[in-house]
Amino acid sequence: MRRGGEALDFPPWMQRAIKARLDEVSARIEHDPELSRVRGETDEAFATLFAGEDVEQTPEYIEWENRYIVTKGIENERLYMQGLRDGIQLTVSLLGVSMPEEIDTKA
């Protein structure tokens, strides 16, 4: 992160807190029921993929690729939204402003 052309380093305790939060959110997303279902479908499509010889031209490959893209999209969206909520919460905390309960309950 930069401020006025110079590097802005977070203190080590904040870096550790950010890393811990990212690990926690990643673990929660990893065990999400909807994402587990989508991953299962993606894995099935991938297993079917190798039954054909010209893999990239088969409907199975296209099906697997589509499911993989959807899975990654869900993961990225959840990580982005949680990062956005955490960033807002951090900003509000640093500014000393009280936050609505809605943001706290989604974290």
Image (spheres, rainbow, N blue to C red):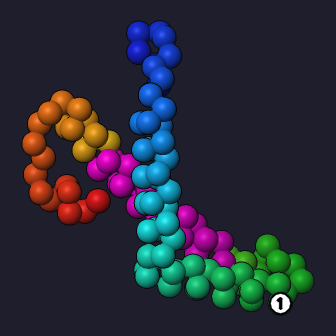
Q: What residue is rendered at 47% in x and 9% in y?
A: 5
The residue lying toward the viewer, choosing from 42 and 18, is 18
Residue 104 x/y as whole percent: 20, 57
Q: What residue is rendered at 57% in x and 79% in y?
A: 39
Against 13, is 106 above or below? below
Q: What residue is rendered at 46% in x and 68% in y?
A: 29
Q: Amino acid at mark 1?
A: Ala
Against 20, is 24 above or below? below
Residue 12 x/y as whole percent: 48, 32
- Identify the magenta region: 63-86
74 in the magenta segment: yes
Point out the image quarter for the C terminus: bottom left
The residue lying toward the viewer, choosing from 106 and 14, is 14
Which residue is most to the top? 5
Residue 30 x/y as whole percent: 51, 70
Q: What residue is rendered at 82% in x and 77% in y?
A: 55
Q: Secondary structure at mark 1?
A: loop
The residue lying toward the viewer, choosing from 97 and 83, is 97
Magenta: main secondary structure: helix
* Image quarter of residue 93: top left
Q: Is residue 59 visible?
A: no
Q: Residues within 10 Å of mark 1 (few under 14, many from 20)?
A: few
Q: Is residue 93 left or right of residue 73?
A: left
Q: Is residue 18 visible?
A: yes
The residue labelled by disc 1 is 51
Against 57, is 21 above or below? above
Residue 10 x/y as whole percent: 44, 28
